[in-house]
Amino acid sequence: MSDIVALQIRYDGRDAERHEIELGALGESLKGVSRVVGIAGNFAVTGRLAYHTQAMDVRVMVKETKANCFSLITVLQFAQQHGLLQGGVPALITALVSIAIARASRNKEEMKHLSDNLAKAIELSAQGNAETVSRMSEMVENVVAAMAPGLRQAVEPVGVTCASMRIGHATVITESIAASIREDEPEEYDVERDFVVRLTELDLENATAKVRFEDADASKGKRIRAVITDPVLAVSPNPYLTAFVSGASIKVRAKVGLRDGSIVSIFISNAPG
């Protein structure tokens, strides 16, 4: 493996002024930083969104601490060459992390301001390839949303054992920004599209169910609550009951509810077959 980019993770103020930091808060923060940087780095290098470490083509490594306040160096390594321009990776990671911070702290003005930087960074990484630029731009919202849980972990020390932190050259996370990031995010809804699911519970009376997605990455292997609005459910037999009894998967048309970039609910309108 070879290094592609090094990022300083810096904690300032409070205990960090004495070059020390609470271990528990640091451990939680580094887990979050690893997720944030891993998702952003993998997307910057491969143009793909990966939720799990095992599915990523990059590794997030840490080097020795530095004595300026409290800081560490994280290094992204990759196993193979990819078509994207490696020189554009640091700028794209910085842009992704900054816009993820703005989104998680609900700073819409900052998001608008940062969107131009993100577009330029994608253009650079894609080396001007219109198809790649379009594909990566369409994926940005999901990539940024997937980083949100990691950010909530990453800011654990801020306001407790340090006054601020910074990931690379991204936006400085102050105590007020960290407080906004920690707040529960309301559920958002994706556009209606097709999914393949397996029903593990089915309540015909209340038109509800529990489902698993055939694509394990979609719901990270968890069972998701479902609401079925399809009137066909009231008829017997129907495709939902048949699939549930047989244990077979079923293709459905649905919207999913998202929180912190993760699917938490699904609203099924029909089963196109």
Image: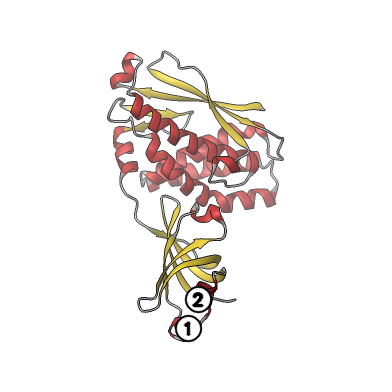
Q: What element carries label 1?
A: helix
Residue for point 45% across, 52% down: 262
Colour scheme: secondary structure
Question: Residue 240, how many percent across, how many down?
Answer: 50, 76
Question: Can you identify the residue that label 2 sits on?
Answer: 240
Residue 257's quadrant in the figure? bottom left
From what the image shows, is residue 24 above or below residue 267? above
**Lateral position of residue 159 relative to residue 99, left or right:** left
Q: Find the distance from the CA under tag 1 to the CA under tag 2.
A: 9 Å
Residue shown at 37%/17% (left/top)? 69
> What quarter of the picture does the N terminus occupy?
top right
44, above or below 65, in the image: below
Closer to us: 240 or 71: 240
Dot label at residue 232? 1
Q: Is residue 172 visible?
A: no
Q: Quadrant of residue 122?
A: top right
Q: Earlier in the sequence, mark 1 or mark 2?
A: 1
| Mark nearer the viewer, 1 or 2 | 2
Label 2 SS: helix
Judge left or right: residue 20 versus residue 139.
Answer: left
Give the percent coordinates (x, y) of residue 126. 67, 42
Taking the image as shown, residue 233 lies to the left or right of residue 248, namely left
Percent position of residue 80, x then y: 71, 35
